[in-house]
């Protein structure tokens, strides 16, 4: 086992360093490292695949836990209509497009459904990294884009649960699926509300005794405890890790836990992506080059179109809408996880996995260059629009600028006002005043901390 870990880490380290020097995402380096140590390139396994797969499964849990830690209700409220309409447009549009591509390619319903799920969400990590490297973190479109990514992550976890259920029964039953969605929704609400009521209070009481070592051990214990709870309830372990991350995100210790988790997440995430690479046969990439190109084109065009439309319908300016759409032109972590799920359950065509991974690599590589094309494309379209359309675009620009000026300095007050309205409504339900007060005390203290 130590030998396996040594080979894996040294290969991943050297290759990722090379990719950093080439100014490419290290995720691609991990996948290439997996190809190098896997059985398909040199005809033999340099590491024990079972060990790597086990570590990779742990890596998935840590990655989802950390994604949950980055979830902020305040950010979601601030994004508002843009996040909701934008995410719905992208997810529904890309799923319909992905399913259609699958059926046109003569894939069966199950393969087409998995393909649709793989194509419907962008990579949070890659999008935010690309925005940061482009120096656009303060750009106006970033708030809406962040809200959309948050909702996509939530939908991705829900899709994992639903696809697992569909795959096990190897059928798509509408009524039973609706029941599963209902049970899942109720379970999520109960877990989240109970977690917000109990965990922040406990952490606040023991805060004087929490050094970094104790805090990280406690956080991991809570994460694994929720993983076991999710499995006992009949849901995926990924759901439990994500939910506990969401709960801890609303505590005063959220940023501290996130910082402490970073090294663990990086190590196990690297192992996960290496395990992804180990399943790729380079020969199959040459064999399936045509589907890889087609899927990549579908991802790029679909994300640009649906991302732009969704943000425009959500109230953004055309330029900001296009900036979001052009930044979302890739698939990533959740696509790999869904592809792995299909392979492990033996419900997807073996060719689908390398096609998706290769398409992800290609679109990730192209993302920075496509983002640079946003302004030229916007200028070209604007200059060729009819005068009436230009007037609508200009009016929207003025409306957004005016709204942004009015919102300056009042975002925190607006969020607290919203919280007070919800709190007032809950007081008239069967929930006691004490419980409501405790819930919002935990929420508001975390906002003040931020």
Image: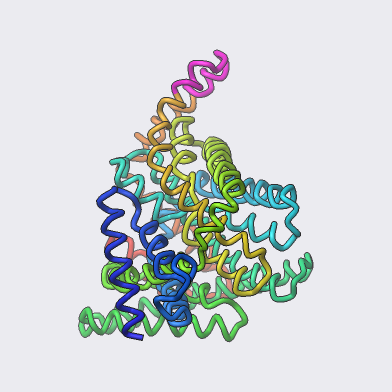
Task: Describe residue 424's horizontal placement relative to residue 371 as left or right.
Answer: right
Secondary structure of the magenta portion, mostly?
A: helix
The color scheme shown is: rainbow
Q: Is residue 280 above or below residue 88?
A: below
> Is residue 246 in sight in this rendering?
no
Q: Quadrant of the N terminus?
A: bottom left
Q: Is residue 172 above or below residue 303?
A: below
Outermost residue toward the top in this view: 387
> Is residue 87 in sight in this rendering?
yes
Q: Quadrant of the C terminus?
A: bottom left
Does the segment drawn in magenta span residue 400?
A: no
Does the segment drawn in magenta span residue 387?
A: yes
Task: Describe residue 255's horizontal placement relative to residue 306 as left or right.
Answer: left
| Observer-nearest of 399 and 227 | 227
**Which residue occupies 70% across, 76% down?**
168
Outermost residue toward the front in this view: 43
- State which region is magenta: 379-394
Instruction: Please tell me how many numbered marks the rendered image carries.
Output: 0
**Which residue occupies 52% across, 63% down?**
281
| Observer-nearest of 40 and 382 | 40
Q: Is residue 50 above or below residue 138?
A: below
Q: Quadrant of residue 342?
A: bottom right
**Which residue occupies 30% across, 78% down?**
6
Residue 332 percent coordinates (x, y): 47, 56
Residue 65 percent coordinates (x, y): 42, 71
**Which residue occupies 39% across, 79% down?**
199
| Observer-nearest of 329 and 401 | 329
Residue 22 percent coordinates (x, y): 29, 48
């Amino acid at each position: 086992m130590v030998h396996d870990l040594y080979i894996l880490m040294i290969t991943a380290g050297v290759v990722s360093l090379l990719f950093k020097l080439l100014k490419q995402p290290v995720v691609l380096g991990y996948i290439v490292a997996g190809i190098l140590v896997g059985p398909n390139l040199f005809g033999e396994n340099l590491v024990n695949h079972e060990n790597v797969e086990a570590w990779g499964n742990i890596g998935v849990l840590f990655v989802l836990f950390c994604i949950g830690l980055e979830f902020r209700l305040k950010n979601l409220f601030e994004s508002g209509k843009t996040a909701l309409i934008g995410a719905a447009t992208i997810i529904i549009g890309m799923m319909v497009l992905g399913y259609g591509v699958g059926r046109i390619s003569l894939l069966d319903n199950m393969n087409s459904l998995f393909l649709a799920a793989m194509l419907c969400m962008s990579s949070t990590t890659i999008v935010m990294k690309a925005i940061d490297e482009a120096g656009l973190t303060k750009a106006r479109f970033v708030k809406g884009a962040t809200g959309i990514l948050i909702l996509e992550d939530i939908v991705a976890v829900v899709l994992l649960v639903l696809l697992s259920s569909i795959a096990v029964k190897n059928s798509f039953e509408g009524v039973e699926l609706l029941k599963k969605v209902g049970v899942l929704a109720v379970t999520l609400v109960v877990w989240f509300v109970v977690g917000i009521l109990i965990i922040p209070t406990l952490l606040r009481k023991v805060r004087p005794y929490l050094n970094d070592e104790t805090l990280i051990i406690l956080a991991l214990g809570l994460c694994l405890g929720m993983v076991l709870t999710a499995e006992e309830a009949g849901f995926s372990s990924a759901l439990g890790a994500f939910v506990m991350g969401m709960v801890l995100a609303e505590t005063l210790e959220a940023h501290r836990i996130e910082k402490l988790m970073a090294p663990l997440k990086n190590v196990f995430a690297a192992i996960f992506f290496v395990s992804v690479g180990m399943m790729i046969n380079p020969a199959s990439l040459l064999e399936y080059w045509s589907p890889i190109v087609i899927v990549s084109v579908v991802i790029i065009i679909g994300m640009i179109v649906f991302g732009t439309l969704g943000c425009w319908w959500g109230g953004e300016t055309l330029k900001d809408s296009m900036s979001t759409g052009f930044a979302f032109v890739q698939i990533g972590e959740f696509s790999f996880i869904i592809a792995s799920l299909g392979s492990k359950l033996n419900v997807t065509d073996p060719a689908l996995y390398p096609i998706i991974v290769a398409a992800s690599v290609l679109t990730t590589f192209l993302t920075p260059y496509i983002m640079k094309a946003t302004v030229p494309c916007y200028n070209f379209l604007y200059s060729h629009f009819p005068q009436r359309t230009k007037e609508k675009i200009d009016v929207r620009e003025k409306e957004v600028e005016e709204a942004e000026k009015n919102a300056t300095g009042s975002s925190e007050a607006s969020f607290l006002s919203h919280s007070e309205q919800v709190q007032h409504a809950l007081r008239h339900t069967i929930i006691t005043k004490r419980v409501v007060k405790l819930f919002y005390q935990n929420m508001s203290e975390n906002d003040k901390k931020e």
